[in-house]
Image: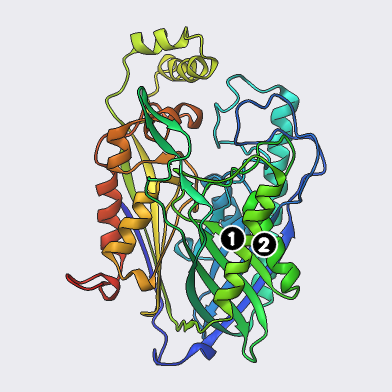
Amino acid sequence: MVTQLCTVMAGGQTVGPAGWKAGAASVDITPDYPVRLSGYGSRTTPHEGVEMRIRAKALALTWENTPPAVILTVDNCGVPATIRAEVLQRLKAAGHAIDDARFSLHSSHTHCAPALPGLLPFLFGNELSGEEQAAINRYAEDLTLRLVKVVKDALDKQEPAKLHWSSGKVSFAMNRRLKNASGYSNSPNPYGPVDHALPVLRVTTADGKLRAIYTSYACHCTTLSINKIHADWAGCAQKELQLRFPDAIAMTAIGCGADQNPYPRREMEHVERHGVELAKEAVRVINEPMKAIRGPITCASREVMLPFDTPHDRTTWEQRAQDKNKWTAQHAKHFLATLDRGEKIPAALPYMIQVWSFNDDLLTINLPGEVVVDYGLRFKKENDPARTWVNSYTNDVPCYIPSQRVWEEGGYEAAGAMVYYGRPNRFASGVEEIIAQAVKELVPTGFVQTKGKK
């Protein structure tokens, strides 16, 4: 177990919001060459055009003379930890070192953005051509360069600022795990658990000019399935907010929405409708009284190991390699090759949990992967819900992260998706408690919900 803890204790914690400096920046990350899109394995060709350009945006926050913290949002299905690490390394080489625990990278999980190396490696069910893989590798390098640039720009633009936050409500997310005779299907389930909260961070200059709006919502970015580049509802929300506030940078992250879909979906009118709904609610929230956020920021991260279930033996892998399902067969052939090289198949997944606390005003919990809604609901129950903000798809997207309930129920989020992510098996029972215990150890005691308090 590896623990990183970065606590900044500025002199005079009672200093108000004027102690902040903040800077925000945006960069276009749309490729100008053909590349395969991630998100759906049914696509068989590079993208067929650009329906909406995609962007990365950074918000740099510094309390007094302490090291900065950076929030980075990226319009992509998932930015793997390898690219995040490379961004941090290049920033350090350029004289802008950011502590690992103070850097949160949030993927929007749009299914209409370019594929990246190491993410969903078996999504297409076959080996990509040399030309296709070269385009993906080229995009990874282009993206890395632009992420470094946008973070540097945000750091350079910092000026005295004030931070406020509050939460609204948006209703287009619906649970997508519907029980049927054979298990659970990916279908609307109006009776399943949801989290419709819309936390909103408002960043203004010292004299009150709006500079950034940062929101998060627990819902898949899967309104569209077109083979064109598009930022889905998260991008539409940002576009709408920046039309209303052209001098501000609008950023959107994803909460614990791995088992939530936007409804209605699949039509362009719906993605625009969802984006406008979120933007309108964010506008309402920032124009109502909001709670001031003081510094310092305490940033902590911890890596835990999430064990996989009982491993397959070689005979099982050989049988699966002959499966008529091309995804199952490719997945099995990969692990047979691993055994043939004399290597061990991974027994567990490294998983880094990140917790930030802004004085005693706001707690943010950042979780990697496609995390189901139970986690967000749980952590807002165990900690003060009026001060707790939970994100997923943060810092890495290694696979789905099921709760114990979802693991026991089974289905795509519990097991089926592991094939596309290249994991050897579903997780073992109990990963929720491993994650919850680590979060509990990282969260400052002042945020913990006391018994009987609501």
Choose between 357 and 390: the one closer to the eye. Answer: 390
- The picture quadrant where one finds residue 425 is top left
Q: How far across and down, in percent of the image, does residue 58 sit?
A: 63, 65
* Marks 1 and 2, the one that precedes in the sequence: 2
Label 2 secondary element: helix
Say which mark, if any, is on residue 446: none
Choose between 401 and 23: the one closer to the eye. Answer: 401
CA distance separating discs 1 and 2 = 7 Å
Residue carrying label 2:
238
* Above or below for 261 versus 62: above
Residue carrying label 1:
252
Disc 1 crowd rating (10 Å Cα; few below 14, some 14-19, many 20+) is many
Q: How far across and down, in percent of the image, does residue 217 sit?
A: 51, 58
Q: Is residue 92 visible?
A: no
Q: Is residue 65 visible?
A: yes
Tell me if 447 is positioned left or right of 265 in this view.
left
Residue at (27, 41) in percent of width and height:
404
* Above or below for 295 versus 41: below
Label 1 secondary element: strand
Q: Which amino acid type is shown beneath numbered disc 2?
A: Gln
Do the numbered discs 1 and 2 sit on residues whose CB atoms are within 8 Å? yes
